Image (cartoon, rainbow, N blue to C red):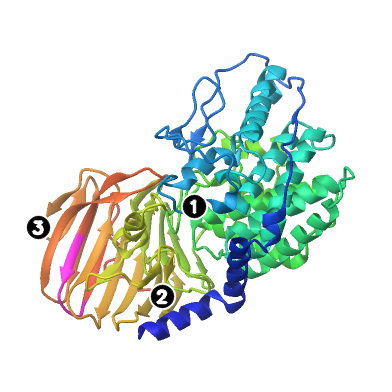
Amino acid sequence: MSGLRSKAQTILGLGLLNLARVAGYRIGVRSGLHPVRRIRASSPIGPFFLDVEPGGSRAATPAEPALLFSRWSATAAGDPPDWLADPLTGKHIDRAEQPWWLIPDFDPAVGDIKRIWELSRLDWAPRLARRARSEGAEGSDRLERWVADWVACNPPYCGPNWKCGQEASIRVMNLAMAALILGQADQPTPGMLDLIEVHLRRIAPTIQYAVAQDNNHGTSEAAALFIGGAWLADHGRSGGAGWEQTGRRWLEERAKRLIGRDGGFSQYSLNYHRLMLDTLSISEIWRQRLRRAPFSSQWHERVQAATEWLRHMINPWNGDGPNVGANDGARLLQITDTPYRDHRPTVQLAAALFLDRRAYDIGPWSGGLALLGVETPIKPSPPAGSRVDDDTGFAVLARDDARALLRYPRFRFRPSQADALHLDLWIGAENLLRDGGSFSYADARVVEYFGGVFSHNTIQFDGRDQMPRLGRFLFADWLRTSKLEPLCETDDAASFGAAYRDGAGASHMRRVLLTANSLVVTDEISGFKGAGVLRWRLAPGDWRLKDGLAVVSGDRTMKIAATAPIVRCELLSGRESRHYLEENPLPVFELEVAGPCVLTTSISWGDGPDLALGLTCP
């Protein structure tokens, strides 16, 4: 496809209205004509939270360090962090007095701005509020000190922490949830209301820009306007009702546009799906708390589908799931003693709110319900089996303890990763075949590796990516599914298949057949000029080559057969990122062919027979 035609199609895919919104925003901010350039406010004055009576044991526990991206310890001894420093390097960014709009997105002086933003999301506030419920004033003192210190160090609309409307929105939601946990939602302090109002004045003028992204910026900012506006309106603050109305309108519109009928979200990402679902759960909790009218039936239908989508994507053994799509470490509602990659708290809360069912039995992932005043339903959800989301291109195959995910191209919104026909395999809690993740957004070369075909279990043609890049986060020539073989299930197996043809003429058809003890993947490839490279990114372990075309680790065996001469077959070292800014090695089984052929990969595990070999689904 010609470069001009490719760019034209990408522009149409992004949407002319969205591009106009972005252009208008950027021109307006640079010229000074945009209303966001004219907002002014004084720093709010505390207290922001009141001391609370303990609801449990008064025994104080050691201060937990705040974690960066739920992985890296960022504070010590309970002291507030330096809000304008990189917690990992200690490098201070001296920009506190500079208007936010003068700070570029990727400034070498700032580095990865997400490192600066992360602690200023205040995701520690609900966690500290939970501690304060048991420790009383002794526990709430740290929460008050940290919020007051953040306010003092971040004057309104100056410095990097005011640069992004979504970051301000996440602060609003975390402050609101902390007040709710402490029982201070009905009688917030004047300082808290001032702090919420200062944030809404920053969010409201740029909501059109957030909406133009067609991602979680729009849902987050709409939720903040709805929650914060309704909260302010109930306490006589002017402007609150208008913000509430704007937030409700965009919450309705965003759910309708960004969540498909099958429940998939516009960002094609497990982590961003969780962020979106937590955002809508928080919105519903506050709607009920403030006794507002219910959202529309269509809104509820889309959120219900999104809840079921995430429930089917993750495994029930540890709550983990495929590392599919962009993963920037976002975790909005941190009030349970569960690790970052455990998605069960999100699903359990959303299932209770929107489906009136328990997604799982009672466990640590259920702790947030009682804390937020949400009743645990009696009725359980049925087991999460095979499921196809044809709106956004995800097929989950399930047999006993085995689960496989096939990602295929249905790009109604812009893709963030070149992961067409990527395959994840889970055996119980073990992620045997896995996605590379994201690692960081700051370095274009890192984005190219982790977001490209190199980091996915699929086939690379002629040493290039599946789609040409127009920018760090933008591909051209969005792939389309050219053939689909629907989900088919028997008593013993589940199968599914999909194909695409890329802009350079290469074709790839992948069929997946899963049983309780085996997986067979058939790849038909053609139309490429030089090399076709099949990669299988394996769980870290003692993998070793066997007989040239197989690798073995314990009772796990992978074999590959080809109908054309094999150029090479080797076990290499790759990289994966399970948390933002975390990078670890993993083995990659790589096979190269020089022409059209059929590749058959068979994987077996456990003591059972290899049922997939020779088995077909009708």
C-alpha distance separating marks 1 and 3: 35 Å
Residue positioned 76% across, 48% down in the render: 228
Q: Indicate whether residue 172 is drawn in magenta.
A: no
Query: Where 221 sits versus 84, above or below?
Result: below
Number of the front mark, 2 or 3: 2
Residue positioned 60% across, 74% down in the render: 20
Residue at image mark 2: 476
Q: Which residue of the protein is positioned furthest toward the front in this rendering?
A: 31
Q: Please identify the quarter of the rendering in which residue 561 is found.
A: bottom left
Residue at image mark 3: 547
Q: Please identify the quarter of the rendering in which residue 217 is found.
A: bottom right
Q: Nearer the viewer, residue 606 or 275?
A: 275
**Amino acid marked by disc 3:** Asp
Q: Indicate whether residue 594 is drawn in magenta.
A: yes
Q: Position of residue 346 (x, y in %)?
A: 60, 47
Instruction: Please state the extent of the stretch shown in magenta in the rendering.
Output: 590-597
C-alpha distance separating marks 2 and 3: 41 Å
